[in-house]
Amino acid sequence: MADTGKVKMLQTQLKKYSEKLAVLDSERREANREYSTVELKVNNLLKELQKLTEDKLTVSEHAMLRYCEILLGIDRNHIKQKILKDETIEQIKTLGGGKIPICDDKLIAIVKGNVVVTVIQNNKE
């Protein structure tokens, strides 16, 4: 004859895990629905992006730089020297980055870490 205490315990555990399984199954179905919705949105965005860019020919920044160097005779090292004058280097070392005025305050060098990431016009009047 079976131990009634053990049977009761196993039945209780079975009920508990069956209920948990039902909850997890419901959550899985909801997650699958949400996944399908998001996947559809991603695919629609990819299609829209492809339509906008498939016929548009672009020129890379590197290609434009090389064009300026070769055909316009612009020397990158000369530009680098103009941007990184000794006083600018000292300001960058002191401030550690940020917006540094250069070229007689006509331009602002945007510095992050040890990299001048861009140069913008100084709009101060």
Image: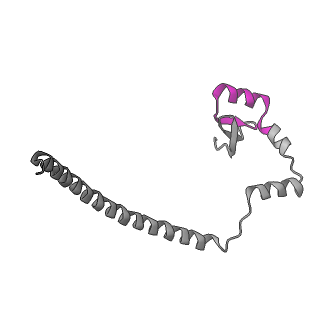
Q: Quadrant of residue 67?
A: bottom right
Counting from the top left corner in percent of width and height, residue 25 is at 29, 61
Of residues 43 and 65, the one drawn nearer to the viewer in this rendering = 43
The residue positioned 45% from the left and 66% from the top of the image is 39
In this picture, which residue range is highlighted in magenta?
A: 82-103
Q: Tell me if residue 108 can be seen.
A: no
- Residue 35 in magenta? no
Q: Is residue 85 above or below residue 47?
A: above
Counting from the top left corner in percent of width and height, residue 49 is at 57, 68
The residue positioned 37% from the left and 64% from the top of the image is 32
The residue positioned 36% from the left and 66% from the top of the image is 33
- Residue 90 in magenta? yes
Q: Tell me if residue 103 can be seen.
A: yes
Q: Is residue 57 above or below residue 24?
A: below
Q: Quadrant of residue 112?
A: top right
Counting from the top left corner in percent of width and height, residue 110 is at 66, 40
Of residues 42 and 87, the one drawn nearer to the viewer in this rendering = 42
* Lateral position of residue 49 relative to residue 66, left or right: left
| Colour treatment of the image | one colour
Q: Is residue 91 above or below residue 73?
A: above
